[in-house]
Image (spheres, rainbow, N blue to C red):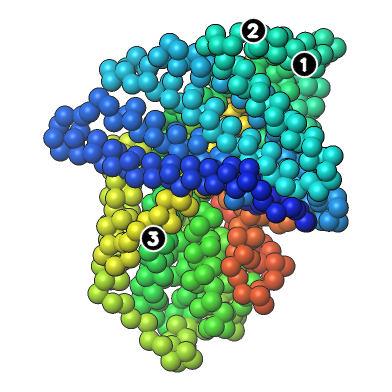
Amino acid sequence: MVSSSDEFEAGHGRRRPDGAVSRVVGGLNQFVGLAVAQFYIVVVAVTVWEVFARYVLGSPTRWAFEVVIIFCSCAWMLSAGYVTLFGRHISITVLQDLAPPRTRDLLSKLAMIVGIFALTLFIDDNMMRALGAITSGERSGASFNSPLPMVLKCALTIGSMLYLSQLLLNLHRATLAPLGRLIIAIVAAAVALRFAANALEHFGLLEPLVAPFQSFVTSATSPLNPQQYVDARSYDLGIVTLLMVGALLVLMMSGIPLGIVTLVVSIVSALFFFGPNGIYIVSSNAFGLGEQYAMIAVPLFVLMATILERAGIARDLFDGMAVFAGNLRGGVALQTTVVAVVLAAMSGVMGGEIVMLGLVALPQMLRLGYDSRLAAGIICAAGSLATLIPPSIVMIIYGLSANVGIGDLFLASFVPGLMLAVMYAAFVLIRCALNPSLAPTVSELAAKSGRRIELSRSQKAAVALCILLVIGVMGSIYGGIATVTEAAGVGVLGALLIAAVRFQMNWRMLQSALVGTMSNVGSIFWLVIGAVSFVGIYNLIGGTRYMQAMFDALDMNPILLVLMMMLVLAILGTFMEWISITFLTIPVFVPVIRDLAPELGLSPADAALWFGVLYAMNVQVSFLSPPFGPACFWLKSVAPREVSLQQIFAGVLPFIGLQLIAIAVVVLFPQIPLFLTWF
């Protein structure tokens, strides 16, 4: 199961009471996390001002771009300790869930040890880049010429240190044996001394003490350089690929957070192929991620969705749709689909949407007498439309990894998303018409519950403003008026206004939304760091060229080759997080798709867009597919006790069939996703 498990951070079983060091480290990480969560308000304010200055005053700023990147990237990086403290890192806990308590405890400790190893090497290299940037006063060189590179390198180093400190503390708390606790304390002290010595050496301080210590560390760790024993470059790339992928799979299944898995495999691969200096490649890839302006749209859309969810907008939308459902049999399921489309268009975030629908729609459908499997299936399927309906986070990440225009991806995914929504609704209505016992009507619900659904004036205004928000955000992107990031910033402002109209705009709601966004995005960021680092190393050793040559050598019909890629993605999607799959496969697959474009009757740009839509649809299938479909587990987390996981799995199976039919239609008719991009 994919989870944001606290097992990695908190350990299992008994642990000793927290001491002074535990309270200090935990308190520091909590304080830093809550503090950097406020940075997103600054990001929104600056983004909205830039939109106003550019499009109203006709005088764009020189500083907004770099200020937004600094604050947003610092929020990502410095939240690592908080994310670790509260167990928000994404893990696959299949083996841990099935293992007996003792084995589960050992796997948890193994996960922490691997994380400590990877982060120590990562920080040891990255902090030298940060110290060098401080000494040179490194600046961006752009018109505003801010200290952007220096700030990002320092933030990445400090965030990694907070992450490492919390891991060491958690391992110490989870260890009961006095000798084990002593060893962990010695390791922590040695790591701290190493980092302090690096700083002192850089600034030329206490040289008589620092030089012998650094020399000792160098001589003590030199036998650990694998290049002394193995010539990795002499091995066939096919064998290297199998070893790297195999290591990924073994570590992932053991419950180690996915970001740490990809990071440690990247570091070990860099050591084998490039020696100790190869770690610089890993840290430079991680630093480069912080400079991606398009990535800022991700936390802004997450924040917009979180504000709308905390303000109760989902319930208003559901009640508003119920007014129009009338006596249509299956009407509640139909309105669930419509609300899911609107929520997807407001946020692009799938997990929160399924949870909201599970809290709002599932109880009403069960009270009305809906079949539990049908109710669970439509909620999971409709909630997963956020992978396709713009502004899809999946599409944003795909665009970054494939170097494809995000606005064009939004246009291409819109029609397939609506097509799936229509297929879901038609399927439910046909099933209910054939078997009326599956779904009574809304009027029957009112008669049974004695409650007539009515919206207050503020709720009606909130629903109307939600529709206007969707039109404004997506219209500004499609019309080329604003960038995706600018539209996301204005969308957050719109969400705040809607919350105010509904009388839900208060300090507690705002802080809850900010902290939730910081936590969710912080876990995503480290996953992306690891995936980007892994792909960077694999590219440097020639892995991408090898995979492309392998696909070219297959000499298959291009459609069959695309279907084979879809099969690979589907298999990976059963046990891997979609972000990791994106950064691991898309840099390999998309160049092949572009080369196949003439045989497919498409231009290279159109082929990349078409494949992006297919990829997002494939991700949607993986979200629902048993046994690890995260959508099913998200719904189960909020479903009544009488709704079992087996019922949810049974309920999603017909909708998976509809998704596969939709994928086949898009494969055979690329014009469906592409025709809007031709205007």
Q: Reading the chain from its start, which is encountered first: label 3 or label 2?
A: 2
Disc 3 crowd, CA 10 A, few/some/many (<14, 14-19, 20+): few
Q: Residue at x 70, y 9 (%)?
A: 212
Disc 3 to disc 2, C-alpha distance: 54 Å
Give the residue pinned by disc 2. Answer: 208
Give the residue pinned by disc 1. Answer: 221
Residue 191 point in image, percent of width and height: 68, 26
Q: Could you tell me if residue 305 is visible in this image?
A: no
Q: Residue at x 72, y 67 (%)?
A: 646
Q: Could you tell me if residue 222 is visible in this image?
A: yes
Q: Which mark is residue 233?
A: none
570 vs 67, left or right, is right
Mark in the foreground, 3 or 2:
2
Q: Nearer the viewer, residue 306 or 161?
A: 161
Please say if 321 is above or below 544: below
Disc 1 crowd, CA 10 A, few/some/many (<14, 14-19, 20+): few
Q: Nearer the viewer, residue 362 or 369?
A: 362
Amino acid on which disc 1 is placed:
Thr
| Disc 3 + disc 2, Cβ < 8 Å | no
Q: Reading the chain from its start, which is encountered first: label 2 or label 1?
A: 2
Give the residue pinned by disc 3. Answer: 508
Residue 342 point in image, percent of width and height: 40, 59
Please say if 663 is above or below 268: below
Disc 2 to disc 1, C-alpha distance: 21 Å
Mark in the foreground, 2 or 1:
2
Q: Residue at x 43, y 92 (%)?
A: 450
Amino acid on which disc 3 is placed:
Arg
Q: Nearer the viewer, residue 582 or 301?
A: 301
Q: Nearer the viewer, residue 110 or 338?
A: 110
Residue 351 point in image, percent of width and height: 54, 55
Amino acid on which disc 2 is placed:
Pro
